[in-house]
Image: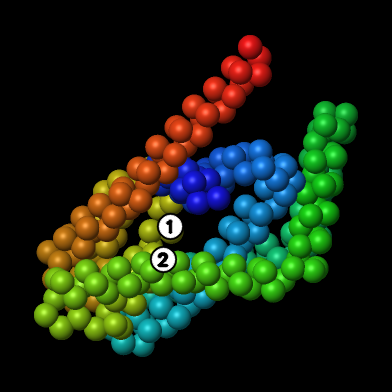
């Protein structure tokens, strides 16, 4: 499971759009153990829980940033607007997934002119997915809450990282400053998710956040480099695991066909 997560996470990091391209990879790798419907359901529920946790983290973090720092009005509007948009996305996801999202999508494709016979091969799979989602959100919500809590701890791990780096860079770091840096950078970087690895843009955003908070931009540049190094260190093992899994699948296929 950890290998599957790392492999998909690495794809998310290196292939745009960020946090989306790796999910099909995770579902594909996981489907070999639990089947297609269960793997897709688990991956999408996890992504839903992750977004819910991110909205909670951003809401708390941006509230602290706005209360403690005299931020430019434009930055406040963009950050808070993004958090509100993500919150609306979370609510919409609950509503859609509980009401048969995939079946609704197929019916919509038929309405716009696609022939039903072209969609028949997908009909059984989508019906199965809709049943799994409906069953999960009806009977397993405590599991979803637990997953959301664990994802929230994951987002707080980034906050801890930021605080430790600030402690090294600054003589008197505060927890509020770390919260503001992490939440504002997260909010603004979410806008540029389509840039591969956010090369250059993530560093620019983090330096700009330091400047908006009245912190030295040189510290922002050093912080950005350290953060980039950690991200790459986390992503490379996932690629190696993906290559190893691919080699294992190819070897097993050769044995069967041989």
Q: Rate crowding at label 1 as few (under 14), some (14 to 19) or many (20 or more) other CA atoms within 10 Å.
A: few
Q: Mark 1 to mark 2: distance in Å? A: 7 Å
Classify residue 182 as left or right of residue 165: right
- Which image quarter is the C terminus in? top right
Q: Quadrant of residue 68?
A: bottom left
Residue named by callout 2 = 187
Classify residue 56 as left or right of residue 187: right
Question: Looking at the picture, does residue 90 appear above or below residue 34?
Answer: below
Q: Quadrant of residue 195?
A: top left
Classify residue 123 as left or right of residue 21: right
The picture places residue 220, in percent across and down from the top left corner, at 19, 65
Residue named by callout 1 = 191
- Colour scheme employed for the rendering of this structure: rainbow
Question: Looking at the picture, does residue 198 appear above or below residue 219?
Answer: above
Residue 247 shows which numbered tag?
none
Q: Is residue 173 visible?
A: yes
Secondary structure beneath label 1: helix
């Amino acid at each position: 499971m950890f290998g599957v997560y790392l492999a998909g996470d690495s794809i998310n990091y290196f292939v745009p759009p960020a946090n989306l391209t790796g999910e099909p990879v995770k579902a594909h790798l996981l489907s070999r153990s639990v089947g297609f419907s269960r793997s897709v359901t688990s991956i999408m529920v996890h992504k839903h829980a992750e977004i819910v946790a991110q909205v909670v983290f951003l809401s708390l973090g941006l509230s602290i940033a706005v209360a403690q720092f005299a931020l430019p009005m434009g930055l406040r509007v963009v950050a808070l607007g993004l958090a509100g948009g993500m919150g609306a996305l979370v609510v919409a996801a609950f509503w859609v997934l509980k009401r048969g999202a995939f079946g609704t999508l197929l019916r919509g494709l038929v309405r716009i002119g696609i022939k039903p016979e072209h969609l028949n091969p997908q009909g059984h799979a989508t019906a199965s997915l809709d049943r799994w989602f409906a069953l999960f959100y009806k009977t397993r919500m405590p599991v979803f809450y637990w997953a959301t809590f664990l994802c929230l701890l994951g987002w707080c791990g980034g906050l801890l990282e930021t605080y430790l780096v600030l402690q090294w860079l600054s003589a008197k770091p505060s927890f509020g400053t770390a919260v503001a840096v992490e939440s504002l950078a997260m909010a603004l970087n979410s806008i540029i998710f389509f840039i591969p690895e956010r090369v250059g843009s993530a560093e620019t955003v983090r330096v700009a956040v330091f400047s908006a908070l009245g912190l030295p931009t040189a510290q922002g540049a050093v912080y950005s480099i350290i953060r980039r190094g950690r991200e790459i260190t986390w992503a490379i093992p996932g690629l190696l695991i993906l290559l190893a899994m691919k080699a294992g699948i190819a070897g097993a296929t050769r044995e069967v066909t041989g």
